[in-house]
Amino acid sequence: MSHETNTSIELEIALLIRRLTSISTGRKFGTLDRSAYLLLGQIESHGSAGVKALAEEFRLDISTVSRQTSALEQKGYVYKMPDPEDGRAYFYQLTDEGRRMLEETRQQRTERIDELLKDWSEDERTRFGELLAKFNRTYLDD
Amino acid sequence: MSHETNTSIELEIALLIRRLTSISTGRKFGTLDRSAYLLLGQIESHGSAGVKALAEEFRLDISTVSRQTSALEQKGYVYKMPDPEDGRAYFYQLTDEGRRMLEETRQQRTERIDELLKDWSEDERTRFGELLAKFNRTYLDD
DNA sequence: CAAAGTAGTTGTATAATACACTTAAATGTT
DNA sequence: AACATTTAAGTGTATTATACAACTACTTTG
């Protein structure tokens, strides 16, 4: 059973949910809640970003993301760099602690998926991951 | 492109979300919000039920479902029959209006999926529906 | 029959969200 | 160059789905 496949699946599910729903009352899958997990993941994979870019990525209101990044900053998972080219804007970047938490959460979530899909065939998991990814991309273009 | 396949997909997605998250701030896909849609669908497919059974089905707190069914009753989509065998309990049943709304919403949601997946192959849509269904069942047994 | 358990409701708190407004900086127009 | 418009971010407020706790009325059990 491929660990990478399951990592992909759990990420795609988290994204699917983010696209389709709003909140998730404290229903944590790992140490970080979903919004924190997705934000940190986005910053990790696409580099530092401002509130506006993050809000667009996740189809959330800027005010919502502003509060979420604020919370992440408070916890020391990200820090804010002023954009040298635009006095209004900032770039959020991961701290070492943020990177550590992200990895820890990713591992916890992946383990959860490992357990849930332990009886699925390799082919099923691969296919499911691919299709969720495709669906999430389809949804994005809407 | 099979309409039935897409109906199945949208139902499974709604279920997936219900399982994994909590709320969805007014993010309606049709006339009914997700909780109303799922509750009416459950009553339609599994027959009249009380608050407790519905809460268990959707892994929600009884108080949450109590409020949701209350709202549905208020809108005239369900009515409450006292359980003849248990003076504390009730059975919620669909009204004609509720059945109509359910069907309308189902159609709207399915159309949305039709549109989203218009470029997917028949095989992909079938497979995605199957896998989501399988995943939801897997999740249930947790 | 009294005690414990249960179905449902209601009160209260929480959390993620949107929308409206604000502030400060950037951009565009005459 | 001055003023108007736009824009990035933050803040105030309302909404909503949810959980937990307390309560009521009924049922089951010892």
Image (spheres, coloured by chain):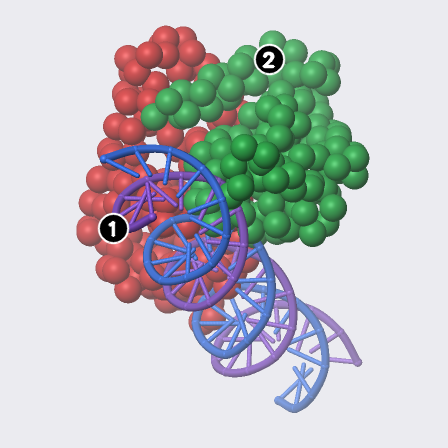
Chain colours: A red, B green, C purple, D blue
Q: Are marks 1 and 2 on the same chain?
A: no
| Residue positioned 65% across, 39% down in the render | B81
**Badge 2 is on which residue?**
B126
Of residue A111 and residue A59, the one placed in the foreground of this image is A111
| Residue positioned 28% across, 64% down in the render | A74
Quarter residue A118 falls in: top left
Relative image position of residue B86 (x, y in whole percent): 52, 37
Relative image position of residue A48 (x, y in whole percent): 37, 52
Q: Secondary structure at mark 1?
A: helix
Quarter residue A93 falls in: bottom left
Q: Secondary structure at mark 2?
A: helix
User: Could you tell whether A44 is left or right of D10 in the image?
Assistant: left
Q: Looking at numbered disc 1 in the image, what kind of residue is underneath it?
A: Gly
| Residue positioned 67% across, 35% down in the render | B93
Q: Chain of mark 1?
A: A
Of residue A100 and residue B99, the one placed in the foreground of this image is B99
Of residue D20 and residue A122, the one placed in the foreground of this image is D20
How many residues crowd mark 2 within 10 Å: few (<14), some (14–19), many (20+)? some
User: Could you tell whether D22 is left or right of B40 in the image?
Assistant: left
**Badge 1 is on which residue?**
A98
Quadrant the N terminus of chain B occupies: top right
**Residue B9 visible in the current orientation:** yes
Quarter residue B113 falls in: top right
Q: Chain of mark 2?
A: B
Quadrant the C terminus of chain B occupies: top left
| Residue positioned 68% across, 47% down in the render | B73
The label number, if any, that marks residue A5 in the structure image: none
Of residue A30 and residue B39, the one placed in the foreground of this image is B39
How many residues crowd mark 1 within 10 Å: few (<14), some (14–19), many (20+)? many
Q: Looking at numbered disc 2 in the image, what kind of residue is underneath it?
A: Thr
